[in-house]
Amino acid sequence: MTLRSERVEQSGPAGPGAESLLDFLPVPFLEIGADDGVLAANVAAEEFFATSRQQLMHAGLKGLAPPDHPVFVLLEHLRQRGGSVTEHGVAFSSARFHHDNVSVQAADVPDHPGIILLTFHVTAAPRALDQQMAHRSAARSVSGMAAMLAHEIRNPLSGIKGAAQLLEQAVTAGDRELATLICEEVDRIDALVERMGMFGEAQLNLRPFNIHRILEHVRLLAMNGFARGLQILERYDPSLPPVWGDRDQLVQVLINLVKNAAEAMRESGREGQISLITRYRPGIRVAVPGTDEWRHLPLVVTVRDTGPGIDDTVRPHLFEPFISTKPMAVGWALRWWARSWMTTAAPLMLKAARGAQKSACICL
Amino acid sequence: MTPPPTILVADDDRSIRTVLGQALGRAGYQVRSTPYASTLWQWVEEGEGDLVITDVIMPDGSGLDLIPRIKQVRPDLRIIVMSAQSTLTTAVKATQRGAFEYLAKPFDLKALLAVVARALRPRPPMRKKTALMACRKNGWH
C-alpha cells in the first residue's frame, strides 16, 4: 500500500484524496519504493519527465536516470541514515526531457521504511539571477575604480601632453619626432581610459515608455545598418503595459543584442532569422539590493537568433567582465552587462547551446 | 601700451598649472594660477583677471559651482572649464551654468590657445533691442 492510498482510506470517500491534492502541487513529486520503483507521481512530475504516470510507475526511477546518477546516492544515503537531504545542481536527461540545475529534495518516511519522497525544483533562473547579482556587485567596484582611475590618469596625461607640445616647439627637428611620439602615446592611453569608461554607471532617466516603439526603432536601425539583408521577425504581445525604465539605455542594450545576433549569423554563414518577441510572464521578481523591496519583472523581451549558439566553455562566464568570444576586447556579454543590468536593474537571461538558437531575455 | 590680458587658472594638478602657465605665457598672456577654488573666487571678487580657466574638482570646492557665483558678480568675465571627467553630463552642466567653453583633458594646447583667443575677443556692443531683451530676460527693468 502506498502512502497515497493509505491517506485516501483515512480521509474517507467524502474528503479530498491525497492523490488529487498532490496533483495541485506545482512541484514534481515522486514516491519511491524500497526497490527504487515509482509508487506515486503527481501531474507536475508527469510534465517534468514528459512521461505518463502509468509509464513512470512501470519504468521506476531506473527508467528515468542512469545507475550512477546522484539521485541513487541520495536514496541510499537516506535509507541508511534517514532525515531529509537536498542535492543541488543535478541534471536529468533523456530523449524526452532535459533539465539542468535541478535541486532534488528527498525525505524518508519513518513509518514506512525504504520509502523516499522526492521533489524536484528547477533552479536555473534563480541561480542565474544570483550570479548576475554577484557580478553586478563586482562590476560596481570595477566601475567605481574605472571612474576614479579615468580622472586620476587624465590629469597627469594633460600635463605630459602639454609639456611635450611645448617642447615640440623648442627642440630640433630630430627631437621633435620624439615629442610627437609622446603626444601620440598620450592619446593612446586616453583612448584606453575612454574604453574603461564603459564600466561607468550612467545616470538613469527613468520614465514609462512603449516597449514596442523601442523595438520598432531598433529594428529599423538594424535593417538599415548592421542587419541589412537579414530577416527580423516581430512577435509582440500588443496588450503589454508601458515599461518603466531608461529608454536610451534599453535602446543601447537591444541594439547590442540584435547586432550580436546579426554578427553571429553572418559569421556562421547560415541563413536564418532574428526574432524580437515580447510576452507577459508573471512570477519573476528580484530583490532590490540594499532595500527590503522586491521588484516584479513580468514583461519579457526576447532577442532570438538562429546562429551557432554560444561556446560551451564561455557560457558559464558570460556575465563576467572581460569575457568575450569576440575578437574585439569588449565583447557583447560585457556590454550587455555593463549597460543593462548595472544601469537599468533589468536582469538578462541567456538560453543557448552550441549548434542551437540563442535567446537573450530581458525581464522588465 | 595696453597691458596683456590676465588669465586666472585654477587647477589642483601642478603639472597642468605649469604647462598652462608656460603655454599662455609664451602666447603673450599674463597668468595667475592657484590650486584652490577659494583663491580663484577671491581674485574674481577683487576684480582681477580677464578670463578664467578652471578645473571642476578641486580640494576646497567645485569649479562648476563657482560659475554662477562668478557670473553674478562679473557677468562679462568668460569662463573656460576643463575636466578629466570627460562626460557629456559635465559638459552640459558647465554650459548650462554659463561656461564659455568646455575642454576635456587631456586637451591640445593649440585647441586651448584657440579657445582662449576666442574668449578674449572683444564682444560687439549689444544693439539697443538686444540689450533690452537681455534686460527683460534677466528680470531687470
Image (spheres, coloured by chain):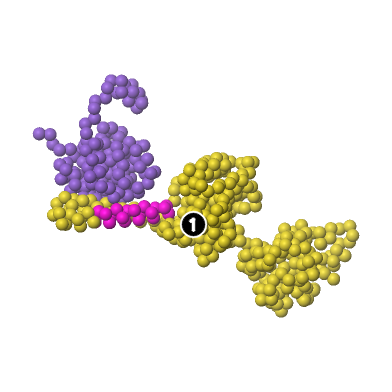
Please name the residue shown 26% across and 54% down the image.
A184
Taking the magenta stretch, the answer to whether it contains residue A296 is no
The answer to which image quadrant residue A243 occupies is top right
The answer to which image quadrant residue A308 occupies is bottom right
The relative height of residue A363 versus residue A102 in the rendered view (above or below) is above
Q: Is residue A129 visible?
A: no
Quadrant housing the N terminus of chain A: bottom right
Q: Secondary structure at mark 1?
A: helix
Taking the magenta stretch, the answer to whether it contains residue A185 is yes
- Residue interval drawn in magenta: A182-200
Read off the chain for label 1.
A
The relative height of residue A150 versus residue B32 in the rendered view (above or below) is below
Residue B2 rendering spot, x and y as whole percentages: 12, 34
In the picture, one chain is yellow; tell me its letter. A
Please name the residue shown 24% across and 36% down the image.
B119
Name the amino acid type tagged 1: Glu
Is A27 placed left or right of A164 in the picture?
right
Is A356 placed left or right of B79 in the picture?
right
